[in-house]
Each structure stands twice: as structure tokens, then as C-alpha cells.
Image (tube, rainbow, N blue to C red):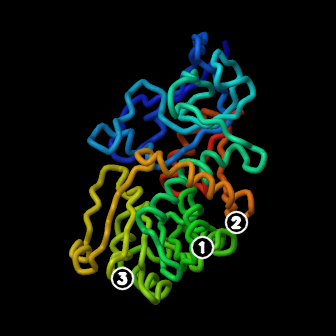
Amino acid sequence: MPRNQQIVLDNRPQGEAVASNFKLIATDTPALKDGEVLVRHHYLSLDPYMRGRMNEGKSYAASQALGEVMIGGTVGEVVESRSTRYTVGDKVVGMGGWQEYSVVDGNAVGALRKVDTTHVPLSHYLGAVGMPGVTAWYGLVKIIAPKAGETVVVSAATGAVGSAFAALAKARGCRVVGIAGGPDKCKYATEELGFDVCIDHREHGDLKSMSRALKEACPNGIDGHFENVGGYILDAVLLRTNAFARVAVCGMIAGYDGQPLPLQNPALILINRLRVEGFIVSEHMEVWPEALKELGMLVATGKLRPRETVAQGIAAAPEAFLGLLKGKNFGKQLVKLV
């Protein structure tokens, strides 16, 4: 059996996450039991939610255990099978974690899903046609539920979630405004992803400036917002919301280092009769088939052209992850393992 390199959480962050929180180890891959498959991971997904799992405090999911392989989505290939459901060569997506191989029970519901790479590249099943894409779909379709002509806004606009959000919202006839960091990301948002406007938060680094930028970008106000960041960006968006606007809260990356993110003017929720709803996409598995079908079609027809930032090798995962938290990635952050 092959030697398996893994990255485990060695210790918990004290404030900002650092590379020394992680540890690279190597283990022997166990022999397969009946019903199991051995998956060689081709790509590992890095996502902001992983930062929250590193903390010990209460969250929407259990903390990452110390000394255990870091949680994470993976795509790869079945290289050995003792399962009647999978054959060698099958391309699969699962939650294999930060490691080169995983042994999976082929009968476990939802543990693996076969994917077709004829029209959609394998790596996209970790981004646009995977969990981030379904996240964008759920927040837009089930919470914001926009009508044609409405204005919707998304923060972290050029990431894996934001880029899918833009394509989905444009397909529904919305005016789509993004918030991203830097002129290159904003140019990509408007020229390739289909955003009508993209606001550079590096040029508008406080509430007053961001509020002015949103007023200009959203002359008819904001009907729907998809929040990935929090902090002053959310405060500025709420100031521009119309009556009965909907806010889908997906992430709070500005607070992942442990600092609380108070709302400056929560009375706006009442004044504008806002619907504000947080969600975790893994709790809504019933929508995945419908969402994945639409996302796959958008990618296959070129209406969604996601970008990827790819680090090489399992040892590069910690630094790539820390870069993701600081917005250094362009599009979906992956680690190539093969």
C-alpha cells in the first residue's frame, strides 16, 4: 500500500492562524476491508470555513481535533476497490481531507460521489460545480429569491462562491454588484464573470467610503445581499438596503481570528423589515442535484468561467490556506496533489 503524506492540526491558533499550527506527517495506508475503496486525491480544496474549525470554541460544526488530518474536500481517482459500487478509474469527489490518499467506505451514504469530467474539469467539482457553487445557489435561490431587475450584492466577489453567484444572478436578470480586493480582481469580475460593477474594498476601507461606493453602484438600493466577510462591509450594505431586502449570511471571514464583529446599526433590520438568514449548505443536501445541474450547464456553456489558484504538493497547503485568509488567491484556492 502507498505511503500517505498528511497534514494534521498540531495546535490551535492564538489569534491569527500561522503555519506552525499545522504538521506534515507520513503514514502507511491501511489494507482495504470489504466494501472499501482507496482514493488517490488529485486536488484538495481550501476554504475559509476551515479557519473556524481550527478554534476550540462553539461554532456551527465540531472543532477540528488536534492530531487529526485537517478536514477538506477532495477530488480524485479510485485506485483500488473492494466495493461493488466503485471501480478502479472512477473519478470521485468527497471529504478526503489534507492528505494524498483516503480509504472510504463505499457503502456510506454521501461519502463519495462519482463525477463526469467530459465537459467539466475535475478540479471544478471543488469549486463552481461543487460545494462553493451550491453555496452560492442556495443563498441566491432559496434565501434572496430575486426577481428580474433587482439589485444583488456579494462580498468576496471573485472567490469560488462569488463567481458562481454572479453567473446565477445574471441568469435571473439581476443587476449584480461585487466587492473584491484590488483592481485586477475587479477587472476580472466585470470583464469575465459578468458583474455590472465591482467595488474595490482596498480603495474603500472604511464604512463612510464603502457606503458612498455602494450608493453609486446601487442607485436603486439593494434588494439582496450575500455576505462572506462581515465587518464594515456588511454595515455599509445594510445602509443601502431597500425595504424587505434579503441577506444570506454565509461567512464572516473578517472575524475568523476570534475578534467579535458587532453590527453598527442593527435597527436597520427592523426599519427595513429585512430577512437575515445564516445557512450551512451541507444541511440542505436536498437541493444539491438541482443546483449542480444548473452550475454544470453554466460551466459547460462558458457562462461561468471560474479561475483557480493552484498550489503544488501537500506540503504547500498551510501557506496556501493562510494566503486564502488574506485574499491572496485569485478565484478558487486548490492544492494539486498529483
Circle 2 is placed at which residue position? 303
Closer to the camera in the image, 59 or 81: 81
Answer whether labels 1 and 2 touch (C-beta < 8 Å): yes
Closer to the camera in the image, 218 or 110: 110
Answer whether labels 2 and 3 touch (C-beta < 8 Å): no
Q: Label 1 amino acid? A: Lys
| Mark sitting earlier along the chain (1/3) | 1
Left or right: 155 in relation to 34? left
- At label 2, counting other C-alpha atoms closer than 10 Å, the crowd grade (few under 14, some 14-19, many 20 or more) is some
Secondary structure at badge 1 equals: helix
Residue at 60% of width from left, 74% of height from top? 195
Left or right: 328 in relation to 299? left
| Mark sitting earlier along the chain (1/2) | 1
Left or right: 276 in relation to 71? left
User: Split into 4 quadrants, where in the image is the C terminus?
Assistant: top right
Circle 1 is placed at which residue position? 170
Task: In the rendered view, tell whether residue 162 sits above or below residue 282.
Answer: below
Q: Position of residue 152 (x, y in %)?
A: 48, 75
Task: In the rendered view, tell whether residue 83 sits above or below residue 230.
Answer: above
- At label 1, counting other C-alpha atoms closer than 10 Å, the crowd grade (few under 14, some 14-19, many 20 or more) is some
Secondary structure at badge 2 equals: loop
Q: Label 3 amino acid? A: Asn
Q: Position of residue 24 (x, y in %)?
A: 54, 27
| Mark 1–mark 2 distance (CA, rounded to whole Å) | 10 Å
Circle 3 is placed at which residue position? 242
- Residue 181: give its label: none
Q: Position of residue 289 (x, y in %)?
A: 56, 49
Closer to the camera in the image, 251 or 151: 151
| Mark 2–mark 3 distance (CA, rounded to whole Å) | 29 Å
